[in-house]
Image: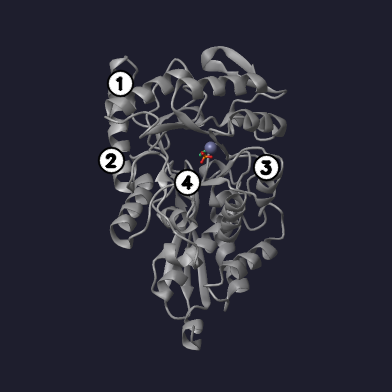
Amino acid sequence: MNSFMANALQIEALTGWEILDSRGRPTVAVEARLAGGVMAQAQVPSGASTGTHEAVELRDGDAGRYGGKGTRRAAAHVAEIIAPALAGMDAADQAAVDGRMIALDATPDKSRLGANAILGVSCAVARAAAIARGIPLWQHLAAGRPARLPVPMVNIFSGGLHAGGNVEFQDFLALPNGIAAYSEALRAIVMIHAAARELAEARGYRMTGVADEGGWGPPLPSNETALELLTQAIERAGYKPGAEVSIAIDVASSHFYSGAGRYELKSEGRTLTSAEMVDLLERWCARFPVISIEDGLFEDDWAGWQTLTARLGGRVQLVGDDFFTTNPARVRRGIAGHAANAVLVKMNQIGTLTETFEVVGLARAAGWRAVISARSGETEDSFLADLATAAGAGQIKVGSITRSERLAKYNRLLELEARAGLSYGWL
Ligand code: PGA
Ligand code: ZN
């Protein structure tokens, strides 16, 4: 890089402001301006079924605005505290930029500046650097690593905190594991989503719009009903369950864990122990084409996770979301202790791009899979599509195929497929 280019890539200004996410709740947007004149923005997502060990999303706490959920303080930190510390730094040196913000925050959970402010800067700086270098965002982020279009893991039925607690399990997803191209996989999902609605209606379930991530959230009588309907929907859409399109579930079990090792399935009128949860999940994997289970057990049930992994880990992808919260230290512990065999990667759980890539790298080195994921509160930013491609992770989970905050990501991947000549598929 010549010195003219290096100067052009210097961070000159950073601004943050409050915007709304797909649930109408405040989140943060950031703009980065570089010395060469390039400007770029990024918008930060926000979860609802959050893990206890996530980095802190800073909220104003002013009950008179958005019930205390305003983000003006976090947004103000961008220009007032972060910008002076980053001024003059090379926007292309992501590790240095993120490292300086981590040092500036100086808390283990990014609670001083707010992970929402820090992540907004991390992503806006990356996008500005890509533009200044004249290359696509995925290529800038990949930094020489092998890039790859991911297989979409797509929400069809929603439950839990995303659908008013109709059933306890949070996501019933279609995972097109045997389809050769991204666009064909997406087409399959669209047909399965439609077939799922027809089947649910035919059984008399009331369909009232869509849930937080755009999937159907009907009042089903049991968690198992969702699995039956989804299996039938795959067939009705013309695909072979298991061979072409399989099922992934996000149990999100921490959100119906009632303490003392008990999992309360209220919709089914029963309470299960950790061992009984493992039995249930094993039975379901035998009866339905389930090949991936996320957060099958409580986020701090390390012993249970080890049992689950010993029983199912050889044939089923066991993904830690609330369990790992994209935290390198927790992922290291999981790898060392044979708890889970895959990690869900959510940028805002940890707060910087550098740490996000660190988690993907740890997973890869251990022979684990990684799934790049959105949050239930999303924005129209498509950043995640480029991130998943750059990470070469092989899988992406960004909700259903309705609502534009979801389509922003799927459509960006269609663009990359059409224009970038990337390979596709999971690892
Ligand atoms: P969240 O849900 O964004 O509400 O945490 C997504 C998930 O649990 O995977
Ligand atoms: Zn989850």
Q: Label 3, on which residue?
A: 334
Q: CA distance from mark 2 to mark 1?
A: 19 Å
Relative depth, front residue between 424 and 42: 424
Ligand 2 closer than 8 Å to label 3 CB: no
Amino acid under disc 3: Gly
Q: Nearer the viewer, mark 3 or mark 1?
A: 3
* Label 3: element kind: helix
Q: Earlier in the sequence, mark 4 or mark 3?
A: 3
Ligand 1 closer than 8 Å to label 2 CB: no
Q: Label 2, on which residue?
A: 187
Ligand 1 closer than 8 Å to label 4 CB: yes
Q: Earlier in the sequence, mark 3 or mark 1?
A: 1
Amino acid under disc 4: Ala
Inspect this view and state whether residue 212 appears. yes
Q: CA distance from mark 3 to mark 1?
A: 39 Å
Number of residues whose C-alpha sits closer than 10 Å to that of mark 2, classed few (under 14), some (14–19) or many (20 or more):
few
Amino acid under disc 1: Leu
Relative depth, front residue between 389 and 245: 245
Number of residues whose C-alpha sits closer than 10 Å to that of mark 1, classed few (under 14), some (14–19) or many (20 or more):
some
Q: Label 1, on which residue?
A: 199
Q: CA distance from mark 2 to mark 3?
A: 35 Å
* Label 2: element kind: helix
Rendered view: 43 above or below 153? below
* Label 1: element kind: helix
